[in-house]
Amino acid sequence: MTTLSIRITKEATEVAEHVEGWIDEYIENLKNNDYNKKKRLMNLLKAYQIKKSESKIIASWFNNLKEELEEVIESSDEDLKEGWDFLSESKIRKLHEFVSDICDDLESYGKITKKKRKRKPEQVIKNLKYQQNIKVGKFTITSFDPTQILTSKSFVALNTKTGDLYYYETSQSFDIKGTTLQNFDESKSYSQRIGRHTESFCNLASTAGVAYVQKELNKFKTKKKIATGRFNEHTVLLRVLG
């Protein structure tokens, strides 16, 4: 086997030798019209605990063979083709595909994925506009802590200027970008004008059990509209439901 020009670990060298053995076996099977089993390179890389940087180095070596095969396929140079005349053109194409898959797996394994920095709840909601408290009829309604949105599965809010009630539900985790709610289920979330029921429902949402609040939500007969996820200074966060 050709020595890799950059110093790598013994394990990485062994993996490269394994892969070269696979390629030799693949060529022999092509020559003899035998079946070639699929190789699981990713499992091999993990078993040997190959570093991502080493995977890229191994890929660069096998890329040389990949490029040589591309030249054989595309070039009209007879001298170049003569070195591979023990295989038909269709078999060289199969070999090229096999080597390309190896290179792709090595490159993919070698990609360094940056971990998304976890934001503190306070940072996520810092630009969220909402109304902290307001007097609705006889009752003073106070918004729940907006950081609770991030750990909830459903909640209700109210626009005190328009009288629109908002119900939001998610099967993932809510997120907030600026003043807009993200990751809510659009098929289950909605807004609904509750008009003269605003005062009684606000009191109910603040004092009654979750199951009862959800039951009362289903009693409103006005048309449900698409929830936008947008919040403003008139939005009171009424109750976390789940």
Image (spheres, rainbow, N blue to C red):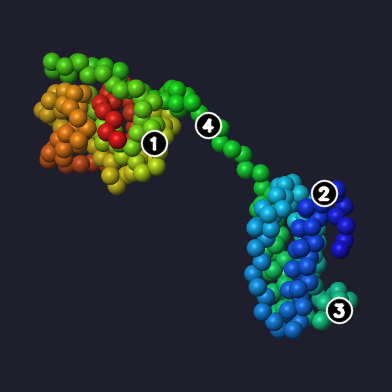
- Extreme-front residue of the structure: 47
Q: Is residue 105 visible?
A: no
Q: What residue do we see at 21% from left, 23% from top?
A: 206
Residue depicted at x 34% and y 41%: 170
Q: Establish if 148 lies above or below 6.
A: above
Q: Verify CB contact (< 8 Å) between mark 4 and mark 2.
A: no
* Residue denoted by label 3: 82
Identify the residue position indicated by label 4 in the image. 118
Up-down: is 120 above or below 106? Answer: above
Q: Residue at x 67, y 60 (%)?
A: 41
SS of the residue under disc 2: loop
Disc 1 target residue: 174
Q: Secondary structure at mark 3?
A: helix
* Residue 47: % across, % down: 68, 54
Per the image, the residue denoted by label 2 is 8
Label 3 to label 2, Cα distance in Å? 34 Å
Question: Which is more N-terminal, label 4 or label 3?
Answer: 3
Residue 230 shows up from this direction: yes
